[in-house]
Amino acid sequence: MCMDQKETDKQTVTIKDIARIAGVSHSTVSRSLNDSPLISESTKNRIKKLANDLNFAFNASAQSLSTRRTGTIGIIYPELYDTFGNSLYMGLLVQGLRHGLEKASLDSIGSFPRNHYTAESNIRKLISRKKIDGLLVIHPEIPVDDWEYIRKSGIPFVVLHFKPRSFDYSWMNYLFTDHVTGGYMATKVLIDGGCRSILCLREDSDEIQFNERTEGYKNALKDAGIAHDPQLIVAGDCAFDFGFQAIMDRKNKLASFDGIFAEADLVALGAIEALRELGVKVPDDIRVVGYDDTELGRYFRPKLTTVHQPREEHARLACERLIEMLESRDMRPTMQKVIKPLMIYRESG
Amino acid sequence: MCMDQKETDKQTVTIKDIARIAGVSHSTVSRSLNDSPLISESTKNRIKKLANDLNFAFNASAQSLSTRRTGTIGIIYPELYDTFGNSLYMGLLVQGLRHGLEKASLDSIGSFPRNHYTAESNIRKLISRKKIDGLLVIHPEIPVDDWEYIRKSGIPFVVLHFKPRSFDYSWMNYLFTDHVTGGYMATKVLIDGGCRSILCLREDSDEIQFNERTEGYKNALKDAGIAHDPQLIVAGDCAFDFGFQAIMDRKNKLASFDGIFAEADLVALGAIEALRELGVKVPDDIRVVGYDDTELGRYFRPKLTTVHQPREEHARLACERLIEMLESRDMRPTMQKVIKPLMIYRESG
DNA sequence: AAAGTTTATGCAACCGTGTGCAAGGCATTT
DNA sequence: AAATGCCTTGCACACGGTTGCATAAACTTT
């Protein structure tokens, strides 16, 4: 009597349904839809048309179970709200990765290394439960046992942006930025602009990338024959307030430096704001160079001279290599790139 | 002789392996690990211990195929790089959602509504292929046919932040911000501060949320008995440069307004920068109020007075409702919330 | 025309897990 | 001692696909 029930409850169509309607076996349907050369063109076309008419779609779970391919990649990246500058950079990088994966019809599960609530390893869970085919890792703090697990699992992966600390990455496929060169270039800009005493505002952590930036800073000074003054290196957390406060703390000895290398754009902007309030002109009195080339630096006046990390290129290359690994199953570290950053000359430095 | 082969190639352990080793059937293992009351405590414990020793993990695909549950939620959200302000807001919101889902052991696939390369609908694909159990939608531009598809599919979902245009959302579970009130509050702050001619810098689109903000602006003027001057509403794309340029374009008639309501923080900051260059004091000469409470406004001087949207609360509530729907299968729109934003009083307005 | 070859299809097993139902074992009841 | 009932477990099928192998049909070759 009531047809609604049947209409509404209609299960989604499977290859068996198609097989029944077309009067063939479900194997034939499977092969047809997968474009197997074993099936005649005429049958294939008939089946394909039918599948299309019925709005057929493969059941991803069933297909994965059978093929051992999920069509999903895990992207491990840090919480966004750490620091503002990073959050944007990270967002854009992940965005780029998503696009790269999309091109190959791959979905992406975004995740943090550890579960926020149970301290369980999200990475292990995704791998062991076979939810993903591969991994893109962008995180400064992957625990050693997770690295170990990733390695043993043999899952294809590419590491981006953050060099693993306390774990050997020489066998991995990776893509980093040469922050030594970045720090060097930034400092060089200041030196070339006539600065002789350069304040370095750096992140207060032993994250490799910041150490490298500082190393580049020191190298540039040395090459220019400028004695390195440890007093001029100040550490804090990479945020606007650190830059602002660092300058305010020194308002009575502003003459002690004539340039500032801030290891993050946001810190540079904080410093500039403080200088402005103190009536110091940037870049006329003090030059300032940032790092990261977040959109921020383009907006504010004076426009920020900064170091650009080529995130689009990073994202593209990483996806390409990962997809290659998925297909070839060849995990050898054929991509170990350390990309040189780019100096963006604007007004502040 | 050579055991390595066997050790290395060891397939992942399945419940059948456990069954064989424990000398029981795989059903017993399945039931034990799922804590079925049908199995005796002693057997359960034995099996669980064994599973643990063997590092067993369920195969997600197999489990999904059988249970029709993937444990994965799709999050549809816009490209990050649209406008800077939005990108950050979006990132934080998505972050909050991830955390909410994590609490219930749900993974999340992030996606855009349309594939960037093939113009195919990512939403339909995720649903039809049964890759996800539910959907969190944060996007101003979901195509009508996608909405239609979502509705027919019967999949649980919650809409956040963007009211669907050109599609009836009265039957959906949603969580929006009351931007009329937001616009009203922002404008009221200016009026209370003594402003009588308020420039409104709005997004040049017919996105509902911006229309609402403008509506609130008009309402506030009306309530204050101020005649509304259409000349004072200027549209542009919500970015720093729009705010900057809008002021620069009016540098000869700065006396024609004494307050600015910018419908996005970034626009407000652009305007403030322009005013600063023109020697106009904020808030002494002209008051400025922004919208969104992106971290930006906290940093720059004068600190931005702005309208805060409670994203943490949005994220939490949305996840709770979605999880509830997943469990109860009751899709009725019991959550239709329009949350009032919060005025953040700082220095600029 | 018979044998051989190619092409197209179906059968059945498999991927790893969940679950209704039957059945065996044991304790309790009559 | 037989009947009853509960607790525990296994069997077998289902979930929706893929794929090796057998086989049937069509086409060549001699």
Image: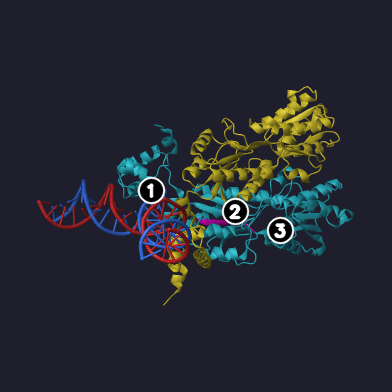
Chain colours: A cyan, B yellow, C red, D blue
Q: Nearer the viewer, residue B151 or A204?
A: B151
Q: Position of residue D21 (x, y in %)?
A: 28, 59
Give the foreground label among 3 and 1.
1
At label 2, the amino acid type is: Ser
Q: Which residue was labeled with disc 2? A: A111
The residue at the point 36 percent across, 45 percent down is: A16
The residue stretch that appears in magenta: A132-139
Asked whether the residues under marks 2 and 1 belong to the same chain, the reply is: yes
Give the class, few, some or many, for how many residues have Cα within 10 Å of label 2's Cα (few <14, many ≥20): many
What residue type is disc 3 on? Gly
Q: Which quadrant is the N terminus of chain A positioned in? A: top left
Q: Mark 1 points at which residue?
A: A34
Residue A183's mark? Answer: 3
B96 relative to B65 in the view: left or right: right
First reached walking from the N terminus: tag 3 or tag 2: 2
In this rendered view, identify the residue nearer to me: B245 or A248: A248
Residues tagged 2 and 1 counted as in contact (Cβ below 8 A): no
Amino acid, disc 1: Asn
Visible in this render: residue A156? no
Q: Where is residue A72 in the image (x, y as percent from the top left)?
A: 51, 52
Q: Does the magenta stretch include residue B291?
A: no
Q: Where is residue B111 in the image (x, y as percent from the top left)?
A: 56, 45
Q: Are marks 3 and 2 in contact (CB under 8 Å)?
A: no
Q: How far apart are marks 3 and 2 (CA)?
A: 31 Å
Q: Please state the chain letter of the residue tagged with numbered disc 1 in the rendered image.
A: A
Residue D1 location (% of width, % of height) = 36, 66
**What secondary structure is marked by label 1?**
loop
Query: Is residue A137 within the magenta segment?
Result: yes
Label 1 neighbour load within 10 Å: few <14, some 14-19, many 20+: few
Give the numbered dot on residue B109.
Answer: none
